Image: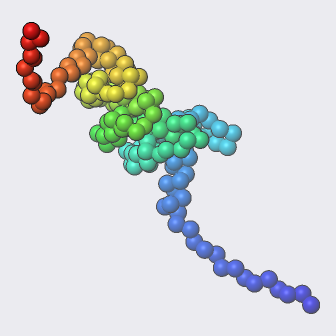
């Protein structure tokens, strides 16, 4: 006897979620270079202001195997959009002390493309950063604007609270 297979009901998939995933993949292809899967789509792709939410997620991703590629992709796309929202994401990324210095520098350079004035202000702030690479790029950015980097804060001597005892004369 042969059994007849049971009928399986189709399940509808939320197309909106798939659209976000497809859009993320398209952004990766556009800024990461063409791949064999979607060679022809890179030239026809353009960013939309609604992509800032996707790019914000990409900018905050931390994948040690990706080597910073999602963040660099997001920074390049945000610089191309040049909106207030994209500038906000780039300011946050450039000021993130937990991020790799190279990624912070990339965010600062992208911010310069979006808003040179805001990039200058961020460079002034990063001129006091504890990382030498970030400080160096911030100083170069300020020099490109014809400004001098902020002078390092002078270290002040700590006041001592111990009382001095008078010296005794050895004679």
- Res 73 seen here: no
- 137 relative position to 19: left or right: left
Q: Position of residue 81 (x, y in %)?
A: 38, 37
Q: Which residue is drawn at 10% across and 17% down?
A: 167
Q: In which quarter of the image is the C terminus?
A: top left
Nearer-the-camera pick, 18 or 55: 55
Q: Residue at x 23, y 17 (%)?
A: 151
Is residue 131 placed above or below 149 in the rendered structure?
A: below
Quadrant housing residue 7: bottom right
Which residue is situated farthest in the right direction here? 1
Which residue is situated farthest in the bottom direction here? 1
The colour scheme applied to this rendered structure is rainbow
Q: Where is residue 44 in the image (x, y as percent from the top left)?
A: 54, 38
Which residue is situated farthest in the front direction here? 171
Q: Quadrant of the N terminus?
A: bottom right
Nearer-the-camera pick, 98 or 23: 98
Q: Residue at x 55, y 36 (%)?
A: 67
Is residue 125 placed above or below 150 in the rendered structure?
A: below
Q: Where is residue 10 in the image (x, y as percent from the top left)?
A: 64, 75
Q: Where is residue 71 in the image (x, y as percent from the top left)?
A: 47, 38
Quadrant housing residue 36: top right
Q: Residue at x 9, y 16 (%)?
A: 168
How many marks on residues? 0
- Res 107 seen here: yes
Is residue 154 placed above or below 87 in the rendered structure?
A: above
- 158 relative position to 31: left or right: left
Quadrant housing residue 94: top left
């Amino acid at each position: 006897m042969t059994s007849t297979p049971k009928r399986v009901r189709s399940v509808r998939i939320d197309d909106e979620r798939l659209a976000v995933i497809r859009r993320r993949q398209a952004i990766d292809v556009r800024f990461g270079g063409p791949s064999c899967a979607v060679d022809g789509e890179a030239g026809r792709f353009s960013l939309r202001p609604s992509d800032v939410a996707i790019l914000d997620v990409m900018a905050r991703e931390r994948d040690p195997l990706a080597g910073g590629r999602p963040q660099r992709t997001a920074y390049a796309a945000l610089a191309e959009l040049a909106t207030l929202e994209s500038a906000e994401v780039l300011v946050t990324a450039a000021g993130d002390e937990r991020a790799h210095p190279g990624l912070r520098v990339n965010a600062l350079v992208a911010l310069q493309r979006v808003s040179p004035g805001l990039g200058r202000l961020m460079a002034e702030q990063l001129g006091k950063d504890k990382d030498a690479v970030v400080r160096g790029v911030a100083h170069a950015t300020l020099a490109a604007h014809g400004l001098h980097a902020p002078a390092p804060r002078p270290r002040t001597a700590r006041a001592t609270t111990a009382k001095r005892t008078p010296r005794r004369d050895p004679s």
